Image (spheres, rainbow, N blue to C red):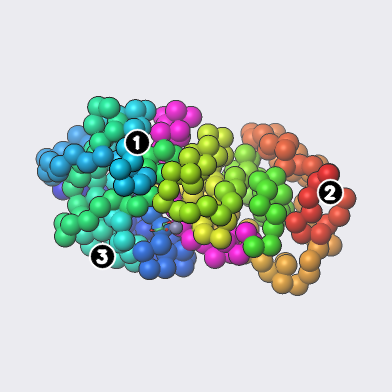
């Protein structure tokens, strides 16, 4: 089967367009990777070519290895490519890469028809996908985007996972159900480098969302619906918080820790108690003692 005719390619392109339509992908902002299932690789193999093996590194001269992903195939967005163009011409903007048996070289087996490289965040995506696969072999999608409300909050909320998560949780009941382990926060660190990649992967060992201060967010999922839905849920809650903050620095009414605990049994979840601290004030951004 041709990659262009596959359900995988259609779902990937749809997610890219959905993200663009949300306003999360100005210019070449954002990147998306998907760890392919063995049956997807087999079904598309006839359409593959053999590119040259290349090192994987965060910086020039740097060589990194992701042994946990050895021999796997990934669909990834191209460096400098615009999400806006993915659905229109997937073959020019996306590629499929294969990792070698040591997990330290990759080659392009499909796509980037007019040349180019996988996303500048490739090592960061692979570091995250490796951690996620170890956590749950069904985890396949890593998504990076620039959602405006979530980014705006990184200027006014403490860059503390507990506080940031709690404020997001309180805006929409659904949040604590969808990501009961909360949001991890990476302070401003230069993007595209090893430090930010490793900090994000550390968060992904336990949490499904990492916010990069003054830049954007990373999230993961077992499929495109779950990864997109997760980002959409976080950003919706962030939008409500921006609206509330524009009216008042504090809340008259809110969801209490006891209310959150009531969700655990009916939704078969366990909301991490780290986020359910008592608040001495309803001021937005309150830091527990
Ligand atoms: O290139 O968003 O962080 C796209 C980015 C890098
Ligand atoms: Zn970015």
* Label 2 CA crowd tier, 10 Å (few <14, some 14–19, many 20+): few
- Separation of marks 1 and 3 at Cα, in angstroms: 33 Å
Name the secondary structure under disc 1: loop
Q: In which quarter of the image is ligand 1?
A: bottom left
Q: Name the residue under label 2.
A: 279
Residue at point 69% right, 58% down? 157
Residue at point 18% right, 47% down? 110
Please give the range of residues in magenta. 129-154
Label 3 CB less than 8 angstroms from ligand 1: no
Which residue is situated farthest in the front direction here? 61
* Label 1 CA crowd tier, 10 Å (few <14, some 14–19, many 20+): some
Residue at point 34% right, 36% down? 64
User: Is residue 40 in view from this perspective?
Assistant: no
Residue at point 72% right, 67% down? 244
**Mark drawn on residue 64:** 1
Please identify the quarter of the rendering in which residue 55 is found: top left
- Separation of marks 2 and 1 at Cα, in angstroms: 44 Å
């Amino acid at each position: 089967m041709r990659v262009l005719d596959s359900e995988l390619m259609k779902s990937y392109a749809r997610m890219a367009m959905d993200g663009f339509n949300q306003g999360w992908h100005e210019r070449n902002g954002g990147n998306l990777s998907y760890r392919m299932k063995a049956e997807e690789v087999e079904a598309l193999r006839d359409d593959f070519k053999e590119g040259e093996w290349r090192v994987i590194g965060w910086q020039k001269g740097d060589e990194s290895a992701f042994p946990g992903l050895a021999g796997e195939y990934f669909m990834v967005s191209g460096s400098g490519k615009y999400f806006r163009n993915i659905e229109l011409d997937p073959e020019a903007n996306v590629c499929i890469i294969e990792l070698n048996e040591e997990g330290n070289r990759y080659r392009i087996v499909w796509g980037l028809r007019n040349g180019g490289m996988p996303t500048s965040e490739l090592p960061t995506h692979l570091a995250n996908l490796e951690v996620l696969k170890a956590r749950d072999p069904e985890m396949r999608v890593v998504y990076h985007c620039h959602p405006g409300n979530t980014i705006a909050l990184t200027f006014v909320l403490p860059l503390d996972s507990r506080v940031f998560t709690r404020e997001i949780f309180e805006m929409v009941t659904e949040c604590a159900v969808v990501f009961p382990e909360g949001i991890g926060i990476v302070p401003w660190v230069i993007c595209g480098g090893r430090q930010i990649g490793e900090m994000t992967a550390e968060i992904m060992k336990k949490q499904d969302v990492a916010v990069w201060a003054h830049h954007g967010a990373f999230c993961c999922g077992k499929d495109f619906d779950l990864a997109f839905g997760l980002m959409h849920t976080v950003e919706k809650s962030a939008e409500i918080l921006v609206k509330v903050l524009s009216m008042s620095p504090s809340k008259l009414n809110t969801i209490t820790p006891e209310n959150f605990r009531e969700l655990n049994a009916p939704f078969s979840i366990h909301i991490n108690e780290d986020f359910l601290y008592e608040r001495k004030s309803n001021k937005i951004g309150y830091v527990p003692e």
